[in-house]
Amino acid sequence: MLIPSKELEAFLEYITINKALGQKTIQAYKSDLLLLEDHAQKPLIELQTDDIFMLLEKYKNKRTLNRKLSALNSFFEFCVKSDFKNEKIYFQASKIPKNLPRFLSFEDIKQALHLIDTSTWIGLRDYALILFLYASGARISEALELQRDDIDGEWLRIRHAKGQKERIVPLAKNAIEAIDRYIDARDFSCKYVWCNYQKNKLSRISAFKITKKYLGVSPHVLRHSYATALVSGGADLRVVQELLGHSSLLTTQIYTHIQKQELKETLEAFHPLAHEKY
């Protein structure tokens, strides 16, 4: 078992007690920093910048490298604040190309919905779930916490959002009707809207299997599809931000690729120089 240096031990205690970080984050920091310290064969605080670069050069995956850089930056920032070290060391993260979000068109989703056998309550559930995810843009974690009382008229209250932030979003009438048809078809009562064969709350894995079966994608792609439909239709990004529950507009701006693509397609379709050589 690797034994941390006294500075690293103090840092781990600091992020556990003072910063109250989540267990997964603490474990990731501990694992990364202990491993680096073990490879260096001396306390991290004694390392020079060149020593650290030599330790990190074997990590070719940029996401892995950035995670270790983040841990090191947090550690050295703590060391300066705690007077363990006079000069702060900071490492710039590597740039990672942003992957454009995958999304489905409304036609793709309609075709999938037509394939569902709605003669059983399970089929009605699958139909309603897909329609709900596309109509609300909810994260799957939010969707699985849904209770019927969360829908008031044509408004949906998302109470179990990421970061425990509540938001209210409009919900299409046909999605509400699909949910009610499914609930009416059940021969049991359940606190949650989305239930499994055992009449318990649907799991994330089961929800993934449903969307994978009919659409070939994860539930999160329906969230991207919701946002894409809004931006493509001309919705303001700040409105989309609020509907999605993004804390920063920067997160929502990934959908501007849709607008750029449409501008390109418009240019290619109508500008004379797009078709003729000059």
Image: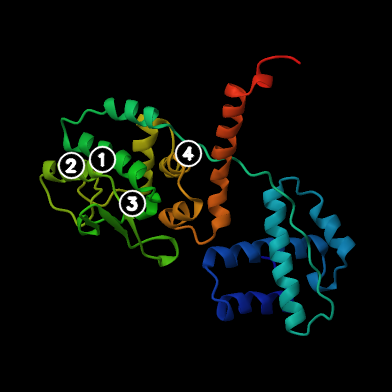
Q: How far apart are marks 3 and 1 (CA)?
A: 12 Å
Q: Position of residue 106 (x, y in %)?
A: 38, 32
Q: Of 60 and 140, which appears nearest the observer?
A: 140
The residue type indicated by label 3 comes to Ala
Q: Do the residues labelled 1 and 4 touch (CB within 8 Å)?
A: no
Q: Which residue type carries mark 1?
A: Ala
Mark 3 or mark 2: name the one nearer the start of the chain.
3
Q: Element under label 4? A: helix
Give residue 85's quadrant in the image.
bottom right
The residue under label 2 is 182
Measured in 3D between alpha carbons, the distance from the residue under mark 2 to the one under mark 4, in whole angstroms, is 31 Å
Q: Which residue is drawn at 76% across and 65% down?
A: 37
N-term mark: 4 or 3: 3
Residue identified by numbered label 3: 143
Q: Do the residues labelled 2 and 4 touch (CB within 8 Å)?
A: no
Tell me the residue that label 1 is attached to.
Answer: 128
Helix, strand or loop at mark 1: helix
**Which of pointers 2 and 4 indicates the residue nearer the eye?**
4
Q: Position of residue 232 (x, y in %)?
A: 47, 38
Instruction: Give the numbered dot on residue 174.
Output: none
- The crowd level at tag 2 (other Cα within 10 Å; few <14, some 14-19, many 20+) is many
Toward the viewer: 28 or 149? Answer: 149
Whichever of callouts 1 and 4 sits on the residue coming sooner in the sequence is 1
Element on which disc 2 rests? helix
Mark 1–mark 2 contact, CB under 8 Å?
A: yes
